[in-house]
Image: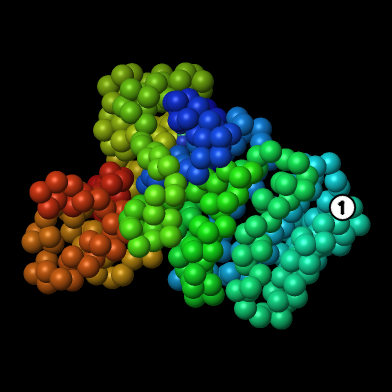
């Protein structure tokens, strides 16, 4: 079946990765998933969480961002709500929180529920003070470390041997430094002692993840086992498309399958989208590929990625596309420093990668087609 947009808990061709990741989650090894947008990180993560059947908390840091700002109050409140409600429920207590309500309301409901069921004084005290500060928009510097300790404390109290905390699009926590300058220090210093919690993070903005996890002066230097999530191999991509078309009873020959893979590479999101369009629009493979960059889903996705970039970075990535997707700084403009800075931003945002011999390459082939207008 082809699905576009939402992550799947049954990703094709990821058996090995799911096996590896599940074992890490069971053993408590912290893991960092790195990979370009739409390669299937969240799907791999969700599939592995289902596989291990441990209680888990999943949050995406991206949800709390808007532009360059980060809603730290909502992040902390909703983290506290998830951790507490997941672990209380797992331990067999009834905790009712109404989804869709504001997070502050959810936190208030939760505290009420927690107090009548199984009151752990240190947990309720932390939640009480946090709620109070969130409501009065006071700084959370003193409460945040205690919130970070919640999963470990509650796992101990309830005798839960292992719980998983998954933070997706982790690099966006960098934006939380405005509210909590030492956020990564606090996380690292607490997490390293959490014997009952397995931490897994993932990130699309590869350059930013790299800076966070691979720089010696960063708190998370060498903390995570890094797993790179690669696009599907061309063999797996073929297999995936073939099975999909078979499922819908649509006949597509091998040359056409190759054409699709040549055009979009092994990025699962695009394979699904092309598959869906061929099946639903009853157009030929050639026609679908020729009009793919005008597809509203593609336009939205790509424009969403590009809108975060500076004007200079946008113009540099466009020039790279016109050169066929890769090139050297000297081919990208006379303003050498401006070009280098733009390329650095493109790398941080996971759009461009640096190859050997000073060559820079756009990672997603569909972005190249889009910017070239073919
Ligand atoms: N291995 C796979 N097989 C089939 N579809 C996949 C696979 N991996 C991802 N997808 C689909 O591709 C899209 C992007 O996947 P997602 O997990 O959200 O990527 P990421 O988190 O890396 O941005 C989703 O629609 C998802 O269902
Ligand atoms: Mg994702």
Q: Which picture quadrant has residue 316?
A: bottom left
Give above or below for 276 relative to 308: above
The secondary element bearing badge 1 is classed as loop
Outermost residue on the right side: it is 116
Could you say which is closer to the camera, residue 48 or residue 316? 48
Residue under the image location 51 percent in, 57 percent down: 188
Q: Position of residue 87 (x, y in %)?
A: 74, 47
Q: Is residue 35 left or right of residue 97?
A: left
Is residue 301 among what the camera can see?
no
Is residue 275 among what the camera can see?
yes
Q: Position of residue 98 (x, y in %)?
A: 79, 56
Give above or below for 160 relative to 300: above
Outermost residue on the front side: it is 193
Q: Which picture quadrant has residue 229?
A: top left
Residue under the image location 62 percent in, 78 percent down: 139
Near mark 1 (Cα within 10 A), the count class, few <14, some 14-19 or many ≥20, is some
Q: Is residue 57 left or right of residue 288?
A: right
Could you say which is closer to the camera, residue 269 or residue 155? 155
Residue under the image location 49 percent in, 73 percent down: 181
Q: Position of residue 340 (x, y in %)?
A: 18, 65
Could you say which is closer to the camera, residue 50 or residue 21? 21
Give above or below for 146 relative to 193: below
Q: Is residue 81 left or right of residue 228?
A: right
Give above or below for 355 relative to 334: above
Residue under the image location 78 percent in, 67 percent down: 125
Q: Is residue 27 left or right of residue 172?
A: right
**Colour setup of the view:** rainbow
Check disc 1 and report the residue beneath it: 118
């Amino acid at each position: 079946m082809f699905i576009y947009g939402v992550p799947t808990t049954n990703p094709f061709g990821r058996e090995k990765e799911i096996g590896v990741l599940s074992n890490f989650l069971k053993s408590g090894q912290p893991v960092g998933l790195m990979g370009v947008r739409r390669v299937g990180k969240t799907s791999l993560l969700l599939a592995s969480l289902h596989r291990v059947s441990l209680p888990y908390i999943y949050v995406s840091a991206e949800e709390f961002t808007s532009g360059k700002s980060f809603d730290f109050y909502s992040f902390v409140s909703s983290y506290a709500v998830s951790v507490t409600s997941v672990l209380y429920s797992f331990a067999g207590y009834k905790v009712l929180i109404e989804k869709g309500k504001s997070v502050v309301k959810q936190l208030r409901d939760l505290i009420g529920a927690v107090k009548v069921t199984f009151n752990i004084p240190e947990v309720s005290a932390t939640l009480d003070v946090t709620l109070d500060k969130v409501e009065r928009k006071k700084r959370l510097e003193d409460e945040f470390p205690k919130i970070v300790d919640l999963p470990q404390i509650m796992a101990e109290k309830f005798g839960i041997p292992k719980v998983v905390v998954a933070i997706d699009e982790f690099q966006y926590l960098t934006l939380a430094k405005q509210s909590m300058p030492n956020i990564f220090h606090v996380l690292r210093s607490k997490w390293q002692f959490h014997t009952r919690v397995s931490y897994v993070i993932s990130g699309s903005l590869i350059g930013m993840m790299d800076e966070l996890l691979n720089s010696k002066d960063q708190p998370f230097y060498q903390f995570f086992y890094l797993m790179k999530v690669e696009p599907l191999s061309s063999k797996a991509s073929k297999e995936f498309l073939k099975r999909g078309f078979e499922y819908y009873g649509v006949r597509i020959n091998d040359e056409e399958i190759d054409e699709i893979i040549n055009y979009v590479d092994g990025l699962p999101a695009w394979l699904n989208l092309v598959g869906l369009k061929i099946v639903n629009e009853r157009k030929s493979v050639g026609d679908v590929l020729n009009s793919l960059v005008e597809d509203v889903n593609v336009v939205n996705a790509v424009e969403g990625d590009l809108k975060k970039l500076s004007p200079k970075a946008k113009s540099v990535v466009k020039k790279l596309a016109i050169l066929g997707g890769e090139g050297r700084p000297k081919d990208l403009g006379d303003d050498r420093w401006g070009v280098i800075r733009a390329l650095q931003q493109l790398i941080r945002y996971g759009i461009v990668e640096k190859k050997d011999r000073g060559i820079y390459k756009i990672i997603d082939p569909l972005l190249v087609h889009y910017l070239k207008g073919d």
